[in-house]
Amino acid sequence: GLDAIWTAMDECVDAGLERMGVLPGALQVRRRARALRDQLTELEARGQDTAIEWLQAFAMAVNEENADGRRVVTAPTNGAAGIIPAVGRHFLRQRPELAADDDARRVAMRTYLLTAGAIGALYKRNASILGAEAGCQGEVGSACSMAAGALTAVMGGTPRQIENAAEI
């Protein structure tokens, strides 16, 4: 099940980075993730460090897919600005050796999702992960905490470091 969840998140990022056009609605908001992807690719070709900007592009891609009514993984990944898939994808981008090793990548993303889920379960039990209950800051805050702890886990952090990352 975790593999299917990560695959859906990963495909959502890819789709959002590919699509162009205008999002549904009266405001006629143009999609921006693909243009940002193209810009970042050019900057990288010139040797510039674009790691943080890629993280933003991944989150934007997920949000544009969500706004377009396409397939996404929810609660709290989309209402919370696409944080969980964006940070997971960012981790994989920073670890190119995982691109060639399906088993290692699968283990890493299972660890990422299980850790994020465990942290999210604590929020759900003791507070909330829902914007409808906790407001946008509560939703984004819990997703950031989940992603920080999960990222620490896949980077080899100890349980204490994971807890600290999630808390901060």
Image (cartoon, rainbow, N blue to C red):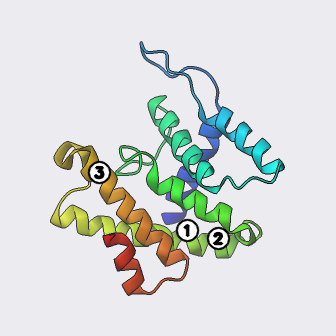
Q: Nearer the viewer, residue 36 or 47?
A: 47
Separation of marks 2 and 1 at Cα, in angstroms: 6 Å
Q: Are marks 3 and 1 in contact (CB under 8 Å)?
A: no
**Element at label 1:** helix
Separation of marks 3 and 2 at Cα, in angstroms: 28 Å
In x, y percent, where is residue 150?
Answer: 45, 70
- Can residue 50 be seen here? The reply is yes
Which residue is denoted by mark 3 in the rendering? Answer: 139
Indicate whether 159 appears above or below 4. below
Amino acid carrying mark 1 in the image: Met
Numbered mark located on residue 164 in the image: none
Label 2: how many Cα within 10 Å (few below 14, some 14–19, many 20+): some
Indicate whether 122 appears above or below 35. below
Q: Quadrant of residue 118?
A: bottom left
Label 3: how many Cα within 10 Å (few below 14, some 14–19, many 20+): many
Separation of marks 3 and 1 at Cα, in angstroms: 22 Å
In x, y percent, where is residue 136?
Answer: 27, 44
Residue lying at the far top of the rendered structure: 26
Q: In which quadrant of the rendered image does the C terminus lie?
A: bottom left
Which residue is denoted by mark 2 in the rendering? Answer: 105
In x, y percent, where is residue 114?
Answer: 43, 71
- For the point 57% across and 47% down, the residue is 58
Label 3 or label 2, whichever comes before in sequence order:
2
Indicate whether 141 appears above or below 21. below
Q: Are marks 2 and 1 in contact (CB under 8 Å)?
A: yes
| Mark 3 or mark 1, whichever is nearer to me | 3
Amino acid carrying mark 2 in the image: Arg
Which residue is denoted by mark 1 in the rendering? Answer: 109
Amino acid carrying mark 3 in the image: Glu
- For the point 51% across and 54% down, the residue is 85
